[in-house]
Image (tube, rainbow, N blue to C red):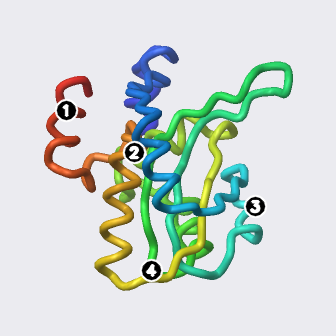
Amino acid sequence: MDAFLQSLAEGEQRLVKCQPMPSRWMAFAAKHPFTWTHVPFSAATGEQVPQEPGFYCFFVGLPPASLPPIGFPLYVGKTERTLRTRFREYVREKDDDEGRVRARKFLKVFEGELYFSFTVFRGTPAEVKAIETELHNALMPAYSDIGYDADVREARQAWQ
């Protein structure tokens, strides 16, 4: 993985394709008024993540205060274990040669600039899966390959 990243120019490494859909964001937020918390992604911030299940999103953004807010969703997921456990798994996976290539890529390329955003949620497995799909459809994160409705997946693949 490191050799692959080193072979790419920094601009290629950091390319994030994004298709903002504010109408989808607003529809999701209206239906699911979650409260999201954001912590910098680093081993040192793991204690700030709750020991409860929920949804999470990795994003790169939150620039200095002298600029308007900017953020790009990179990956969305759910966990029925605890958010803290899942967070720590990503901390370990970043440097694990056996880890998922796409996850390791964004964890390494945006190291020091990543945020882990999360919201606690307890529901039935069917509820969790349905909301995760809606979250994927709303945000269309660049590094999430699965979890979309068929019509959104088709449109996304056209520009990805």
Q: Which mark is residue 155?
A: 1
Residue at image point 43% right, 48% down: 27
User: Which numbered disc flags the more N-terminal residue, 2 or 3?
Assistant: 3
Q: Do the residues labelled 1 and 4 touch (CB within 8 Å)?
A: no
Determine the secondary structure under disc 2: helix
Q: Which of marks 3 and 4 is in front?
A: 4
Q: Nearer the viewer, residue 121 or 57?
A: 121
Q: Which residue is drawn at 40% across and 54% down?
A: 135
Which residue occupies the foreground of this view, 3 or 135?
135
Judge by depth and name the residue closer to the eye, 159 or 95.
159
Judged left or right of residue 30, residue 111 is: right
Residue 17, position in %: x, y? 39, 25
- Circle 4 — which element? loop
Mark earlier in primary sequence (2, 4): 4
Q: Give the Cα distance between marks 2 and 3.
A: 27 Å
Discs 2/3, front: 2
Position of the C terminus by quadrant: top left
